[in-house]
Image (cartoon, rainbow, N blue to C red):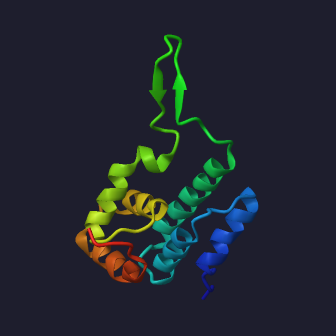
Amino acid sequence: MKKKPNPRDELSALETKCGQTLGDPESKEIIALLRSEGILDDEAWQEALAMYEATLCYLREPDTEDASEDSCHDWIINLDADPCNANWIKIVGAWRKIGHKLPDWVSMWLWTLGYERKEEFWRRVALATRSHAKDDV
């Protein structure tokens, strides 16, 4: 039987490939933990790796402006400048499912991976991540 790669090593390999770190070691640790605990199956893990890589690519890009001035000199807020701002409802949704707050990146990924999953998934996530909880929701 082929041994599965270490999740932390897989995430670190993506950082090397992209030339960028997440800057949020706790999100990296939590997503790797969920893979190690078997909460994320092979399919979910591949999705998580793709999201991690997309996040690294986003972070590598130059800062996008949070606001800009239009031709009428009105300020327009760019809600999509930061994916965590644009997806705050998903982040809070994940917190509510698990009953406590986690870092934004991992919360956003978990919502994407699990919003259609049964309560058993969220219960397992809640138990596995309790030691990383920021506050209860």
Instruction: Please state the horizontal and vertical placement of residue 61, each as a whole percent of the image.
Output: 68, 44
For the point 68% across and 70% down, the residue is 12
Instruction: Please state the horizontal and vertical placement of residue 4, each as a whole percent of the image.
Output: 60, 82
- If the image is split into quadrants, where does the C terminus sit? bottom left
**Relative side of 66 to 133, left or right:** right
From the viewer's perspective, is residue 2 above or below residue 95? below
**Relative side of 67 to 56, left or right:** left
Q: Nearer the viewer, residue 104 or 94?
A: 104
How many numbered tags mark residues here?
Answer: 0
Q: Which residue extends farthest bottom?
A: 1
Q: Nearer the viewer, residue 120 or 93?
A: 93
Q: In the rendered image, is residue 124 in sight? A: yes
Q: In the rendered image, is residue 115 in sight? A: no
Among the 4 quarters of the image, the one containing residue 92 = bottom left
Instruction: Please state the horizontal and vertical placement of residue 24, each as a whole percent of the image.
Output: 57, 66
Instruction: Please state the horizontal and vertical placement of residue 57, each as a whole percent of the image.
Output: 65, 50
For the point 39% across and 82% down, the residue is 128
Q: Which residue extends farthest top?
A: 72
Among the 4 quarters of the image, the one containing residue 93 = bottom left
From the viewer's perspective, is residue 55 above or below residue 16? above
For the point 40% across and 83% down, the residue is 131
**Relative side of 135 to 42, left or right:** left
- If the image is split into quadrants, where does the N terminus sit? bottom right
Q: Nearer the viewer, residue 106 or 66?
A: 66
